[in-house]
Amino acid sequence: MTDAAVQAAPPSSPVDQAIASRNRVAIVLLLVSVFVVFLNETIMSVAVPKIIADFRVTPSAGQWLTTAFALTAAIVVPVTGWLLQRLNTRPVFITAMSLFVAGTLLAAVAPTFGVLLIGRVVQASGTAIMMPLLMTTVLTLVPLSDRGRMMGRISIVMSVAPAIGPAVSGLIVDALSWRFIFWIVLPIAAAALVVGILRVPNISEPRRSPLDVLSVILSAFAFGGLVYGLSGLGASAEGDALVAPWIPIAVGAAFLVLFVVRQLVLQRRDAALLDLRTFRSPTFSITIVMFVIMMVSLFGTVIVLPFYAQNVLHSDVLVSGLVLLPGGLIMGLIGPFVGRIYDRYGTRPLLVPGAVLVSLGFWGLAMLNQGMSVWFILLPHIVLSVGLGILFTVLFTVSTSALPPHLYSHGSATLTTLQQVAGAAGTAVFIALLAAGSAAAGSTDPQDTTPSQLMEGVHWAFLFGAFVSLVPIVIAFFVRAPRSLPADGAPIANH
């Protein structure tokens, strides 16, 4: 992570060398910090049953530990585009990591479920800021010719951290109390905060930009409603929803229309909370479509595979988490190598094979059955993970690099916002299909469903993923890599 990829030019003097060293430290620290905070997004999935038992709450209440996290992030992320323009790099980092550390400590010592839930919300507030901060910093410091290698490292954060969360959680919960999920993360996050206070440079040039309060309110109802509604689809399919999910989805969609109209008006005078001129770049728009499909696939798989292992194959929590670990690790390890290939050969030699591998992985998962050993999950999941690792690295690089510099922060915020919505959508759709497939096989009570009925639901979920995975194969042929950075804020030329 500390090679020349983070230098804008080969150092030719002690001053240049000092700047290059400073940039390396900043990016490495941001990568470590973002990995830690993103790990928390899925690390609770295996621990929730233990927490439900300890605090004696209902399963629907327990699921708020993951729903509230995603909901908070979806509300906060759109504001980060403005925040990164208004404040300098170091204070933004300190704010984000301080929130995350405070939330982690609060969750670790939580005497009640309500306090634990508040801790998760505070954690999510810091998490939402970190990813746009990392992306904007990398786009500012790293030249286009080396950006693929650096985005390969970022793909570790955005793809591996959520993928290995259940495995890490399973290992901890199997040997220790669920509270150690937070106690183990806390010193790492605190150390990153201290080092960041001392070493993160101020690389941006803050400018006065008024915060449009109406846009903040509209975005909160828009993205919050969509994430909450999508998260409720799975509970609704299982007969455990507090409110019909179509209501918050409809509210979110209506406010999203109002939010978009408001941004189109504000961006005429460069005052938008989330500047939508990013979508004027055809490359950015088309890669965002692929990115959303891939995030739906990742989060849906992370939910359904442990469910299949535990409830159909009757594996314990530790094994069900471990089966996802090899694919998650491989997804991360190939990122830097994919980045180097991208820097040398461009997009199409990677995007098309990556999309094909994702599809093959899903078709393999769709052929799983009730009589298989749990270890038969490994091969199709590894194939799927290799494809996702290739695609995430290329999509991160192409989408953001296709924007002019003054839209970097807005492009990063848009990418992270859609990640939250896509993650909720992936979880919701796959769980809903799982429940629908089980019902079609004769299940009438979610609490009394047989393994064969559950297997039918698993088959439905992965068959859906297999058919959807054919779409990115077609899209991959139309993605073009940015040729050069703009000198005057005009859109980048593509090839």
Image (spheres, rainbow, N blue to C red):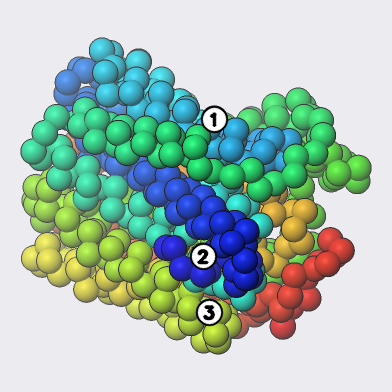
| Along the line of sight, the residue nearer the viewer: 227 or 341 | 341
Figure quadrant of the N terminus: bottom left
How would you rate the neighbour count of disc 2 (Cα within 10 Å): few for under 14, some for 14-19, many for 20 or more? many
Residue 322 rendering spot, x and y as whole percentages? 17, 55
The image quarter containing residue 374 is bottom left
Image-based side of 178 in relation to 234, left or right: left
- Badge 1 crowding class, 10 Å Cα cut-off, few under 14, some 14 to 19, many 20 or more, is some
3D distance between C-alphas at marks 2 and 3:
10 Å
Q: Residue furthest right?
A: 269
Query: Which quadrant: the C terminus?
Result: bottom right
State left or right for residue 462 relative to residue 247: left
Q: Check whether the beta carbons of the residues at disc 2 and disc 3 lie within 8 A of each other.
A: yes
For mark 3, does the 10 Å Cα neighbourhood hold few (<14), some (14 to 19), or many (20 or more) residues? many
How far apart are the two marked residues, 1 and 3, measured between alpha carbons? Answer: 34 Å
- Residue 21 vs 271, above or below: the answer is below
Task: Depth check: give the residue in front, 450 or 287.
Answer: 287
Question: Callout 2: helix, strand or loop?
Answer: helix
Name the residue: 39% across, 53% down: 299
Q: Which residue is mark 2?
A: 151
Q: Where does residue 477 sit, x and y in percent of width and height?
A: 60, 83
Which residue lies under the disc numbered 1? 95
Q: Quadrant of residue 345?
A: bottom right
Name the foreground residue: 199 vs 435. Answer: 199
Instruction: Give me the residue at 22% from left, 73% from top.
Output: 379
Q: Amino acid at mark 2?
A: Met
Residue 342 disc label: 3
